[in-house]
Image (spheres, rainbow, N blue to C red):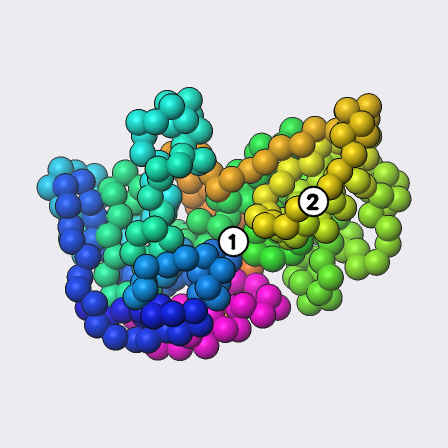
Amino acid sequence: MKAALLVGPEKIEIGEAPPPPLGDGEVRIRPALAGICGTDISIYLGHRPAPYPFILGHEVMGRVADVGPGVGALRVGDRVIVEPNYPCGECALCRRGRGAVCARKGSMGVNLPGCFSEYATAPAEFVWRIPDGVSDRDAVTIEPLTVALHGLLQSGIGKGDTAAVIGCGVIGLLLVHSAAAMGVRVIAHDRIVHKRELARGMGAAIVSGGEEAAALWEREGVTAVFECAGAGATVELALSAAPRASEVILLGLSSEPASFLPMRLVREGIQVRTSMIYDHPEDFGQAIDRVASGALEPARVVTRTFPFESLGEALRLAALGNEGKILIGME
């Protein structure tokens, strides 16, 4: 089959690879659209290890091409997306409902072959049929939407509240969109003017590029701060500027150390939560339902689409950090 092979840091070759085997309970998918994610970029740049040659990609929409033994709910030709993280289901964390942080989970395009190829396989339990009314572009962006929606649902925020979102990358933008659709008033922060304007278009009431966060959040009555930038400095900002009795939800994946003053968090009743991907299967089902109802339109974060043969160029552009979601046309 045709595949985009990562053969080294920042080196993509379009070549041939053996079709993925199809085991019991698995589904083979022919991708139609795929999205580039921050995880893809990290592996592409060599910041995370990969068993070269490796096939990246985990945000995928396509058609079922074949089903393995024991698959009953899906048929060849079904239009589907994949929930690309597969908890083991057996460890102590999975038994406690914490599969999102299962140390043994398999992840498409991370420790399992990805979807930037002619065919990809996934366990049928994690393959979701898409309602007819959902566009292909909305469908392929449901996976990052679910990451954002899970973070939002981890908080106690609701209609009429005010939230601050730090970092208007794809997850931050989708969090702005999801919160605004719930009737939450959103203050969006990003150092890039273009991304602040994207946040305004997704429903942010206030976009801030310079005003001191602590004063702004106190004045506007912020009750939840969502850190989506994934940098040590923005984590420190969230923890130091969060108003009294508010909560801070960390979605970004910073590898840098961050400092904070525990006494302030305790004395002022500031709660700190983390949000890692999503819970299976509830979150994906809820995200699909909200898109199917028309309440959410995740494809609004898409800024560019490239053909499959230009995946290397698309990854280089995505790595600059100035775009929204970049899609790859696989057909």
Q: Name the residue under label 2.
A: 258
Magenta range is 308-331
The residue type indicated by label 2 comes to Ala
* Left or right: 321 in relation to 241: left
The residue type indicated by label 1 comes to Pro
Residue 117 falls in image quadrant = bottom left
In the image, is residue 313 above or below residue 282? below
Where residue 272 appears, as percent x and y from the top left, is 67, 32
Whether residue 285 appears in magenta in the rendering, the answer is no
On the question of residue 133 being in view, the answer is yes
On the question of residue 162 being in view, the answer is no
Q: Is mark 2 on a helix, strand or loop?
A: loop
- Quarter containing the C terminus: bottom left
Where residue 14 appears, as percent x and y from the top left, is 30, 75
Q: Which residue is drawn at 40% across and 74% down?
A: 11
Q: Name the residue under label 1.
A: 298
Q: Is mark 1 on a helix, strand or loop?
A: helix
Which residue is nearer to you in this view: 297 or 118? 118
Nearer mark to the viewer, of 2 and 1: 2
Whether residue 317 appears in magenta in the rendering, the answer is yes
Q: Which residue is drawn at 86% across and 54% down?
A: 211
